[in-house]
Amino acid sequence: MSVAILWNEARQSWRGLLRRPGYLLLAVLTLALGVATTTAVFSLLDQALLRPLPFPQADRLVTLGQYFDTERNSAAPGYYAPARGMRSFASTGMLRSWAINTNIARGDEGRVVGSLRVDRGFLETLGMPMALGRNFNAEEDQPNGPQAVILSHVFWTQYYGADPAAIGQTLQVEGRAAQVIGVLPAAFQWPVQFDVLLPMQPDLASTNLSTNEQIIARLKPGVSVAAASAETGAVLGAVIRQNPRMTEQGRRHLLEFPPNALPLKGSVFSSRTGNTLWLFFGAGACVLLIAAINLASLMLLRALGRSHDSAVRLALGAPLARLGLPALAEGLLIGLCGALIGIALAWLGLRLMATWVPPEWIRGEAAALTPTSVGFALLAGAATALLASLLGVLRVRGLRLTRELVGGGRAGWSRGAGRLGRGLVIAQVVVAAVLLIGAALFTRTLQRLSEVPMGFESRAVTIFSLAPIRERYAEVDAMIQQTDRIVERLHRLPGVAHVGAGSNPPTATQLNWSYVLPDGRSISAQYRFMTPDFFNVFDMPVLAGRGIGPQDTAGAERICVVSAAFARQYLGDSPLGKIVAIEDDGEDRRIPMRVVGVVGDVRQFGPAEPAPPIVYTPLAQLSPGAWKVIRGFGGLTYAVQSQAGTGGGSAERGLREAIAEVAPQQPISDLDSMDAVVASTTSDQKLNLLLVGLFAGLALLLAAVGLYAVMATAVAARRHEFGVRAALGAEPRRLLRQVLREAGLQIAIGLLVGLGIAMAMSRFLQRFLFEVRVADPLAIGAVVAALALAGLLAALSPALRAARVPPMQALRNE
């Protein structure tokens, strides 16, 4: 078949298609919705999981340590020196697992930035060249060495206007002069967002086994990950067993998670996102599948409309291959248009979703279309449309010439085509039911989470972070005096009821510490220090004894208040008066504290997690050693509760001025309402519901459109049958019930199969749910009601047309 013939057939098909703008628009939009959903999620998958890391020979990069959870491979300072001596690695580097707020100043302009502490081996091991300047040198990498700063490319662009002269300039970092020595390349990626890199200056003689760091390494040529993991387990396992500072309980805990080596990409870049993004991609693929089924139904109807023309051409000797060209040409045009519109919708959707997708999921980048995802969209659109158009080709092969020619093109829906149409509807309902069940379960999960008491009051509370400038407030007494001044000044703001300061807010952050119980056991639990009014800010109830008061000063008896969970797990029925000792990591000693009160539990890790045991101590009794350690993790959290009826606005408006008045050049950060902080604890579940709910809504809409199209065509094809039945005395309501019954049967079959598939996926779905089972009656009832209502609305119009067929007109037309 010549190119001219192919082009002529395609051109004629496209002209005919353009003369049916309603059909073309419906087909293109149907496909575009499916392409848009899958392309948007595929773009996130590409950014997070599929794209190779930007580092040279990234497949040889690993992390060393222990995989405690699904977020990262954690390591300790005491692991670093042994790791540097392992034979499997060409180089190693260490970094802090998270960025912390850091005060910087250029001239008189102070601000808070996110800093990540790394050693010089970090950038050496990754192997990426600097955009400007250099890496930390050996002197800067030594304990107490000179300060230096490496800027992220984004921070360099925003703060220095991408000026190359930034190299060599001086910044004040926590009150100390630090030289800007380098700028990272634009292609540099890391899941933790940061503005600047600061030298970690590791102590290679450290025996500290607190796993707050990460160690990365580059494998030597010829060394496998398995071999490196075996060496890591042997060497670091010996470090744990031989550490003199470890308690037996702590040693057993660490050895429950044998040290290993894991690929950098899986253990750092994609560990949190994998399951969730594949869930979203599966949901998007379901929408594309429904769109494909719907498109197949539309193209089948289109092929039925061409049946008489095809039969005439076949009778005149046209080959079957040529008869299938119109359907394939139409599919190609629909596929291209649907893919282009789908790309535009995916771009818009990603822009709208930008604030919902955590940056650490996608390597610290913004959610955006990638070139690979654009290619995926074009391929998905063309392939889906062409596969759907094959139904038209198969329809041509199954033509009955006598029936089509004698019927004059009014032969209608054959038995085989009818079965195929009904099968497509059932398939759509199956997929829609699976998505609707997922959306209903996520809705129930959010409902259950919203019903969980957090243990504190968040309304009318504003919080912010303040990290005292280290050079000015290096000593704990200076920090306490600054805190007292700020708290006293904030109390004088109009509309303020209570003001408190402490190490952490009641939720969203954590601080672990080691304690010795009255029976001599060593344990790890949450630690909080605070000013006297902190409990009042959040209306945290004192269940027994008393809270922290102004009498708990540095010279008074050392006391603590424990949470109900701590008392229940470790102190028994009479916790008051018992002595709990806190390990002072800064000075390697134990400080005894008398328990004077018990407060209610708070959901520190969000409503989905149980309340942890917590120890609260007065800020005034914080030891110098503990402050030195804690300051390395960040600063203080201030909380301001507004009086009823003031709305909190007055405290927010005057807050910065009040702090500037008593602590000049002290910047603050993370100013937010506590309600927003609490809402962020369920952000993952909200994102699940947002995407799966959106996809489920699109699936329901497409399934309803598909059911309508099939039922409308079936009614039109059986017009003669309904006319005969009406002429023989069948009542309109009987014909109405018959059509609705057929539609209801298709929906029921699809719903049953969909429920079965959802039950089969229960083990996968359950990990995303909270106190809800996959077989939740309310969720299933909502899905049944939604599908039944959508099916009724979709089938009602065709059923009414069937009931209103004029008998004589139908017979006369035949």
Image: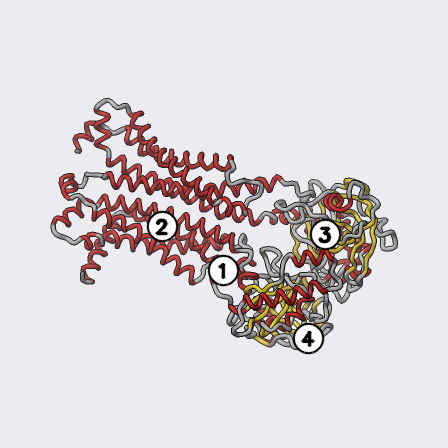
SS for callout 1 = helix
Q: Are marks 3 and 1 in contact (CB under 8 Å)?
A: no
Q: Residue at image x 36%, y 33%?
A: 744
Residue that mark 1 sits on: 49
Tag in front: 3 or 1: 3
Q: What is the spatial separation of the Cα atoms under label 4 and label 3, in whole angstroms?
A: 35 Å
Q: Earlier in the sequence, mark 2 or mark 1?
A: 2
Tag in front: 3 or 2: 3
Asked whether, in this view, residue 352 is left or right of residue 294, the answer is right
Tag in front: 4 or 2: 4
Q: Which image quadrant is residue 243 in?
A: bottom right
Q: Badge 2 local density, few (<14 within 10 Å), some, or many (20+)?
A: many
Is residue 110 something that shows in the picture? no
Q: What is the spatial separation of the Cα atoms under label 2 and label 1, in whole angstroms?
A: 26 Å
Asked whether, in this view, residue 194 is left or right of residue 210, the answer is left
In the image, which disc is placed on residue 140?
4
Is residue 172 something that shows in the picture? yes
**Which amino acid type corresponds to the residue marked 2 in the rendered image?**
Leu
Q: Residue at image x 25%, y 41%?
A: 416
Residue that mark 3 sits on: 525
Q: Earlier in the sequence, mark 3 or mark 1?
A: 1
**Which amino acid type corresponds to the residue marked 3 in the rendered image?**
Ala
Residue that mark 2 sits on: 31
Depth order, front residue of 33/296 = 296
Asked whether, in this view, residue 476 is left or right of residue 76, the answer is right
Q: Badge 3 local density, few (<14 within 10 Å), some, or many (20+)?
A: some
Q: Earlier in the sequence, mark 4 or mark 2?
A: 2
SS for callout 3 = strand
